[in-house]
Amino acid sequence: MRILVVLLLISVCLNFSQLASSKRYLGAKTPANERYLSGRLNSSEKIVVLEIEGVIMSPMTERWEQMIDQIEADPDVRGVVLAIDSPGGLVADSHRLYKRLVKLRETKPIYVAMGRIAASGGYYMAMAAGPEGKVYAEEITWTGSIGVIIPRFDLSKLGEQFGVKSDSLITGEMKDSLDPFKPLSDEDRKVWGDIIGEAYDEFVRVIDDGRPKLNTEAIKTLGDGRIYTAKQAVANGLVDEIGDQQQVIDALAKSLNLEDPKVVRYEVSRSFVESLTGMQAEVTPRDPLRQILDASVPRAMYLFGWDSELVR
């Protein structure tokens, strides 16, 4: 009997795994669940609180895009409160979500409610509200950190100490320019400095579009990577007002002439397979060799919390 039970459990797991694989292959998406927050429950006019929390990167990027698609398709949604509690993330993911939100605001106005932190890529996404939208920060919010970083560790001295050196086979001198076991040359700094410089210029352009009262010179002065408190951000024109999420909801409803709209948020449930793999990931230590290899992979980030000479 015990053997049969074990076989049954294995069969169930395999079936779930095959089902998840077929859904991914067919591009099937599980709709996000709508959760009531406040307002008149039977109102046909809705405001959606879209929560952007944590580091901006996969798999959450795709889930946020899915939520944006649902908001866009729902005719009852009148406006969106973009609730940001994020230190930022990957440059590509931040920009990808920013573009989707800019498109969304063409039909659904966006106001921003910053939480504990809305820095770097988090602030980048806040600019999707545009000049017509309002950006609010709570009294304790940290924001700003305008800049780009490619995290890198120089392990060359450590390698010498243990007799380890880089000896990659390459077709050009720049192919291994971010190898952690090699010091960064002046040419490396120039090449990668130009690359993150373009990403920085795009950040400045995005702020220029979203904050019409700030000119490019002012943005670059503010955009030296430092963090700002809510009061400092308001004084410098990076944020419009100080207020909590409920105040932002009320302000958006008033701007749209809505009386007691239904306020909801979306949740994407984790699948059975994701839950299993998620639990496994929490108890399984990362492979040290994988960590070393990952260190050589360049990742341009709009992210607060790293210390590097490549911050622009």
Image (spheres, rainbow, N blue to C red):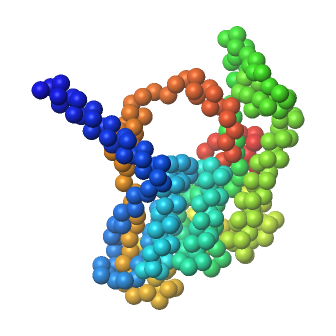
Residue 245 in the image: above or below residue 194? below
44 relative position to 213: left or right: left
- Where does the image place residue 70, in percent across and percent down from the top left? 46, 68
- Where does the image place residue 76, in percent across and percent down from the top left? 42, 80
- Where does the image place residue 22, in percent across and percent down from the top left? 42, 47
Locate residue 175: give its quadrant: top right
Toward the viewer: 298 or 63? 63
Residue at 62 percent across and 79 percent down: it is 132
131 relative position to 67: left or right: right
245 relative position to 210: left or right: left
Residue at 83 percent across and 35 percent down: it is 188
Toward the viewer: 298 or 1? 1
Locate residue 276: give its quadrant: top left
Residue at 50 percent across and 52 percent down: it is 60
225 relative position to 185: left or right: left
Toward the viewer: 152 or 246? 152
Q: Is residue 239 visible?
A: no
